[in-house]
Each structure stands twice: as structure tokens, then as C-alpha cells.
Image (cartoon, rainbow, N blue to C red):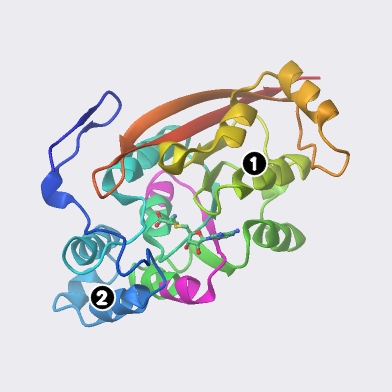
Amino acid sequence: MTATTSPANGLFDPSKAYKEWEVNGKYFGDGREVALLEYMYNHPSLPELRGNPTKILAAIDTFAQTVTGLINIGESKGHLVTSVIAQHKPTTILELGGYIGYSAIMFSSAMKAAGGKHYYSVEKNPLFAAVATALVDLAGLRDTVRVIVGTGAEGIQRLVDEQLLQDGGSPLGMMFFDHHKPSYTADLKLCERLGLVGAGTVLVADNMILPGNPPYAEWVRATVAEKKAKTEAAPATDDPGNPNLQYKSRFVKSFEPSGMEDALEITECVGIEA
Ligand SMILES: C[S@@+](CC[C@H](N)C(=O)[O-])C[C@H]1O[C@@H](n2cnc3c(N)ncnc32)[C@H](O)[C@@H]1O
């Protein structure tokens, strides 16, 4: 594989490339997640991994580079997100699509280092959520990360019912979208309508090239006037979200852990139009 350049994120190091995701027509859920858990807990350096998120992420990367590819965000895109966290210092982060906990371990550590407190990771697949919970525990992040089993919408509603996302009336610090691609816009609009998004909230969306997400990109890049027009033209049954939120959005290119080019959409809510 040849190294490619990205204006935003330097060179991809081919020696760190994950193995192919696709094995016998499957990309995940074929036993590789349980194999990862066994690999981690049978690791010869287990005592040094315990309570050390950096070493745990490196061991997960080694598994994905040498045994089977995993659909984690990986180092290149992951480091873009940790620099957003260091800059914006969110107190609470809501992640939709947790998989085996790689991004939860990486981003919750960055959030803790920046003074943040709560990381909620919603994952639809109960087996993946169980693996994530065990790896979060190994990383010593049990007090910071809570893994919730359910779809994005179910998880958001449960956390709202438990009054865990309102943060004393402040909007959420950050949301990370990495789940079912057609649900990004619907779940963002649900959070907007519930008042969880406000001035200062940062939205990070993965896979904006692979496979891309035009409805989400259109919503977060639109002006308030454009969003109001879209909402008026939409069927009354559609969630209107909150078209008055003013977003500043950028498309940042980077790499999948396989070395393929991908991008994040990083959006800041800069105000609310009266
Ligand atoms: C690309 S993986 C997430 C990777 C993870 N964020 C990381 O970088 O370590 C996508 C995950 O979203 C989950 N998922 C799919 N549809 C979902 C939904 N509607 N709500 C929540 N999770 C969902 C899948 O089971 C899968 O584990």
C-alpha cells in the first residue's frame, strides 16, 4: 500500500494498516470481537495493560493488524477527535455506535485529561456492548464510561429519562456519530428537539467519505433560513429538530485504519437564532 497525503492529517503509515475487514463476506460479528476479548485478557503483558488506555489501544491495534481487521475509528481519525476534545474540553460526551469500545477508551481518556466527567456510549449489539464494557473496565475507565445497549434513539431517550444528558441545563459538550449512517440526521434532530444541542456543542460525524452521508452534511452545513425551508417542506411526521441552531461546519480528510481515505464532519454550534 502506498502512503497518501491528506492536508489535514499528514501521512498514513502503511506499517500500521489493519488487516482487511472482510472475511468470508463478513465485516464484523463473526466471532472476531470475542476473539479480541480473549486476546486481550490472555495477553502476556496483561498487568501492564490494566489501567493503561494507551497500551490497551495499542494492543487492540496489534490484534487488528495481525489477526482480523476491526471496524474501529483507528489512530489517524481518532487523533483528530482527541485534538477537538483537547480544544473544546467537553464535560459530557455522547457516542452513538460504540462497537468494542476503542473510540470510547480513546476519547474518554482525552476528555478526562481535559477535565471532563461523563462518557456515554450507545451500542445496539449487546455482545459488542459487553466486549466494550470489559475493555473499558480493563482500561480503568469504569467510573467515566457507561455503555448503554440500544439504538441511538433508545439510548438517548433512556439517558434523558435518567436526567444524565441535561448537565444542569447546559447543552451536551460533544456528540460522536459512528453508528447506522441513515440515523445520524434523525438522532441529531432528536437531540436538537430535546434541547441537548446548544451554543458550544461540538458534533463529530465519522465516515463522511466511506460511505458518505449527504443528508447529514446538508443539515449541518445549512443556514438557519435553509433549515427552516427544509423543515416546512418536509412531511409533518418528520422530526423538525431545531432549525434555529447556527452551525459552523468543516469537512476534515483523514484515513481509515486500513489506509483508505475517509473524512470527519466537525460541526460547532455557535449560537441560536431568536
Ligand atoms: C463503526 S462501528 C463503531 C466504531 C466505534 N465508534 C469505534 O471507533 O471504536 C458502528 C457500530 O454501530 C453499531 N450500530 C449500528 N446501528 C446502530 C444504531 N442504530 N444505534 C446504535 N448503534 C448502532 C454497530 O453495532 C457497530 O458496533
* In the image: residue 38, left or right of residue 43: right
N-terminal of the pair, mark 2 or mark 1, is 2
Q: Quadrant of the N terminus?
A: top left
Discs 2/1, front: 1
Q: Name the amino acid, label 2.
A: Met
Please name the residue shown 53% across and 38% down the image: 213
Q: Quadrant of residue 224?
A: top right
Image coordinates of residue 212 in percent, x first then y, are 48, 38
Residue 232 in view = yes
Where is mark 2, residue-wise? 40
Whether residue 8 is situated above or below residue 47 in the rendered picture? above
Q: Residue furthest right?
A: 236
Image coordinates of residue 32 in percent, x first then y, are 32, 74
**Disc 1: CA contacts within 10 A as few (<14), some (14-19) or many (>=20):** many
SS at badge 2: helix
* In the image: residue 98, left or right of residue 256: right
Q: Quadrant of the C terminus?
A: top right
Q: Name the amino acid, label 1.
A: Thr
Where is mark 1, residue-wise? 185
Please name the residue shown 25% across and 49% down the image: 258
Front residue of this view, candidates 120 and 263? 263
Asked if residue 117 lies in the magenta stretch, the reply is yes
Q: Which mark is residue 162?
A: none
Read off the magenta span: 110-131
Whether residue 44 is situated above or below residue 70 in the rendered picture? below
